Amino acid sequence: DAKTTQPNSMESNEEEPVHLPCNHSTISGTDYIHWYRQLPSQGPEYVIHGLTSNVNNRMASLAIAEDRKSSTLILHRATLRDAAVYYCILRTILSGNTPLVFGKGTRLSVIA
Amino acid sequence: EPEVTQTPSHQVTQMGQEVILRCVPISNHLYFYWYRQILGQKVEFLVSFYNNEISEKSEIFDDQFSVERPDGSNFTLKIRSTKLEDSAMYFCASKERTGGMQNIQYFGAGTRLSVL
């Protein structure tokens, strides 16, 4: 899977929007952009994924740059429960049964 | 909502002892995984399992490790002779199938293994 780059940490105030960036300049045309998060003392949890178009679900939105070399995970109103490590992972459409490769991710702190 | 269940939540063992970590994947899932996370470090892949055999394993998954799906519901990770460096959180994950929304892995809450 291609490499991604994320800031080590970010901080947000509660009930404010949060934009978590991810750079993936070597992304290929068959790579999906996946986001997982890991709450304290929990296993990783799927958040959202997309290929080219922006995506929304009940947890978050994913904004993908037109050249696909970067993307942004958007939490519209951060809550204390959103404090977690967020991982941006590229998965080729041909990934089949291959495992997820986790980087260090971005540690999001939410301040009340 | 269906979830991956892992037991026990915390296992304490003496160095050299055998441990079995247990997982119940989501019932209609076909692909199964074990990952581990040493305290303060990244989540690392150990092994994947499909159709009753190992699909892929990492260099961490040496001869001391084995996996089994003994029945239609459980998926186990055995460490034959534990070492101090095996102390970590072990996560089980499962996936329905490949492709589209089915290509999402669902993780359990993990088993914390402490080797003394």
Image (cartoon, rainbow, N blue to C red):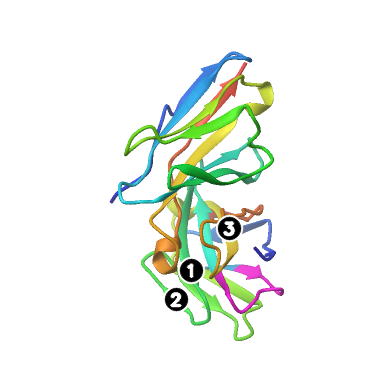
Callout 2 environment at 10 Å: few (<14), some (14 to 19), or many (20+)? some
The numbered mark, 2 or 1, whose residue comes first in the sequence reads 1
Q: Distance between the residues labelled 2 and 3?
A: 17 Å
Q: Residue at x 45, y 54 (%)?
A: B105
Badge 2 vs badge 1, beta-carbon distance below 8 Å = yes
Instruction: Look at mark 3 in the image and give the residue it sits on.
Output: A87
The magenta stretch spans residue A23: yes
Badge 1 vs badge 3, beta-carbon distance below 8 Å = no
Q: Is residue B55 above or below residue B87?
A: below
Instruction: Look at mark 2 in the image and give the residue it sits on.
Output: A55
Q: Where is residue B38 in the image (x, y as percent from the top left)?
A: 63, 36
Q: Position of residue A93 (x, y in %)?
A: 53, 70
* Extent of the magenta region: A21-32
Q: Is residue B73 left or right of residue A101?
A: left
Q: Distance between the residues labelled 1 and 3?
A: 11 Å
Query: Which quarter of the picture shows residue A92?
Result: bottom right
The subunit carrying tag 1 is A
What kind of element bears circle 1?
Answer: strand
Instruction: Look at label 3 and name its amino acid.
Output: Tyr
Instruction: Look at label 2 and name its amino acid.
Output: Val
Q: Which residue is drawn at 36% across and 51% down?
A: B29
Q: In this view, does A41 lie above or below A20?
A: above
